[in-house]
Amino acid sequence: MKEKQMLSEYKKKLDKVGCGFCIAKWTQVTIHLQMGETHSCHHPKTHKINLHEIKRNPSALHNTQYKKLQRKKMLEGGRPSECEYCWNVEDNSTEFSDRIYKSSEPWSKPYLKEIQELGWRADYNPKYVEVAFSNACNFKCSYCGPSFSSSWVQEIKKYGAYPTEDNFNDLDWLEKEGKMPINHKDYNPYVEAFWKWWPDLYRDLNTFRITGGEPLLAKDTWKILDYIISNPDPNRELKLGINSNLGVPDNLINNLIDKLKTIEENNLVKEAIIYTSVDTFGKQAEYIRNGFDYDQFCKNVEKILLNTTKVSLVFMSTFNALSIPKYKQMLYFAYDMKKKYNGDSRYWNPVIMVDSSYLRYPLHQAVNILPEEWTEKVEKLAEYAESLRVVNKTLEEEWFPRHMGFTDIEISKIKRIADWMRGDHDEERIKKSRIDFYNFMKAHDERRGTNFKETFPELSQFYEFCKRLKEHESRSLLQRTTKDI
């Protein structure tokens, strides 16, 4: 109740500036350097970074002219249309929108007055930065695509786009939309601008997170770590995050551990977090994330936790239609890691968490394409996680509470997936997505030497159902074509 009251009071402060004022438009940014695109907050679509702007002003990787005009609207009482997600929440519910939550984050809230006084024309160094240096990646995750994986680019060049209605892996479409990534081996003017901006940006950072591609395959990731080590500031409050599939060669994992140990031993950051991806358990996880070795992944997770004492680890699950059958086993693995490392007195700082975020795109792999009975299975997963809500009772608990089981946030994220599955969905769109599901998995098996029905016996009936939908659609199309002739 107290938190709600505080958020309500803070909303009034924001609304005094403007009913659409959101500090995140200044303080937070995600930059896809491989495509030359940026956005502040994950709700608005990315937009192109102007090459002429970054030549004279490298901070235009964030402070684009387009973004400044959105800031102008906010300061003048307007509501930018690109932020419609938040306006829908504010206009149609009693819940707080992400505008309020993101503006009240530690990397936003202290800067309200400063930003208001600076106005919309000024360049501003963001406090929370997420950056992808390239699309270099050794995986071809089924829901990913060429923009974020060089391995995907190679496959599409060899076989062409997958036969689905959406264009998420079509190189011609990506070229047309300006989303074709710059080859990680080629010169990239956006990366060049980043390094010109970096020394100035670094001084103001609260949180810096490297994504990809696979960051451990990008030379710039190692430059960042070396820069932090070479520019020590023991009083620095920086939070450092690295996304990694942890499926790279041993020498890279070992090198990462060595650099993280140097960073933690010298207190060069306040917190270091590895965000690693795993969407379910065993062979099914390997099918989803092509190139993934589940056993090696588990070994690398333990290697990092055993050899560092202040590095937190978050299991990022892109929860999709293929995650459900074995997700319980994956949850137990995460629970086992919590027990082993959150319960060890050496490990005061690390947090081990599971972040279950449901896939929205591509539509043909989202959980809402599954029949209704699968919603109950997701609810059972939430109940299972709740049954493992255990707190380690130690003398130090008053100061260092160690959640060995799952937290409210982790459980609620799984519950939210079930709620979304039960929501209203466009039936015609679902039908098309189910046909795309069959088309995609069939082509996946042919191209990658996999076998969907053997790997996912729990979903073989659904696969056959989607196949019949495709055959029915093909017959109907043939009949309409014959009739037209």
Image (cartoon, rainbow, N blue to C red):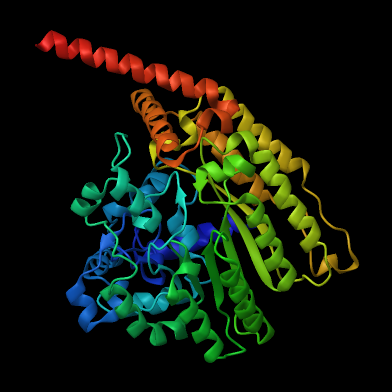
Residue 386, placed above or below residue 153: above
Q: Is residue 20 above or below residue 197?
A: above
Residue at 45% over, 55% down = 98
Please tell me which residue lies in front, 431 or 220.
220
| Image label count | 0
Q: Position of residue 101 (x, y in %)?
A: 50, 59
The part of the image, by quadrant, that contains residue 26 is bottom left
* Spot occupied by residue 434 in the image (x, y as percentages of width and height): 40, 27
Q: Residue at x 59, y 27 (%)?
A: 457
Q: Residue at x 69, y 45 (%)?
A: 331
Residue 119 seen in render? no
Where residue 200 appears, as percent x and y from the top left, is 39, 86
Q: Is residue 261 left or right of residue 465?
A: right
Residue 447's quadrant in the figure?
Answer: top left
Image position of 233 with respect to 160: above or below:
below
Q: Quadrant of the C terminus?
A: top left
Say if residue 183 shows up in the picture: yes
Residues 227 and 159: in front is 159
Please tell me in which quadrant of the rendered image residue 65 appears. Answer: bottom left
123 or 212, nearer to the observer: 212
* Residue 157 x, y percent position in the rendering: 29, 50
Please tell me which residue is depicted at 15% across the width and 10% down the height of the picture: 482
Task: Tell which residue pokes out farthest to the left in this image.
Answer: 485
